[in-house]
Image (tube, rainbow, N blue to C red):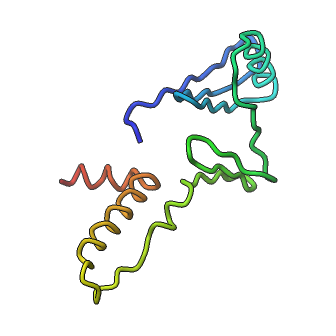
Amino acid sequence: TLTYNLYLLISTKENSEFGIVKIQTNDTLILGNDSFITKKKKKIAKTKFLTKPIQVLNPSESLTFNRYTITINGDSFYILQKSQNTRLKLVNVKKENYKKTYIKQRACRAYIIIIYQPEVIFNLLVTA
């Protein structure tokens, strides 16, 4: 995760449109009401840029953004990094290369913690 993330909050007093835009190199994530999304679609169509089709997150299907799977269930959003948990394996200490395997598994675990629980890393850095 980068320490610099660009988010644009777009809102005015003159109308009820509301939206937040997350800009990535090859992906853009927009959170907005229907009128905001419709306006964005028209602007994109005007530019005639080649773009990926717009996907709408809804309870019946998930959405993939920047290698994350986003789902909605009731009032909650769930963001999962695809397949990171499948990389975790038990370490067999009876094998000759168990130390190397252990280090590799610790790195996988640390990566998952960094992605899913950045506040843990912050707390570790503050106490170090």
Residue 94 quadrant: bottom left
Task: Residue lying at the far front in this picture: please name it.
Answer: 96
Q: Nearer the viewer, residue 62 or 87?
A: 87
In percent of width and height, residue 67 lies at 56, 46
Question: Quadrant where the N terminus lies?
Answer: top left
Residue shown at 79% from the left, 15% from the top: 42
In percent of width and height, residue 57 lies at 74, 43
Number of numbered callouts drawn:
0
Judged left or right of residue 2, residue 16 is: right
Judged left or right of residue 61, residue 115 is: left
> Is 80 rendered above or below residue 24?
below
Q: Nearer the viewer, residue 33 or 103?
A: 103
Residue 41 quadrant: top right
Residue shown at 76% from the left, 29% from the top: 33
In percent of width and height, residue 115 lies at 44, 52
In percent of width and height, residue 128 lies at 18, 53
Residue 96 quadrant: bottom left
Q: Nearer the viewer, residue 77 or 60?
A: 60
Judged left or right of residue 69, residue 85 is: left
Task: Residue lying at the far bottom in this picture: please name it.
Answer: 94
Residue shown at 78% from the left, 17% from the top: 39
Residue shown at 54% from the left, 53% from the top: 81
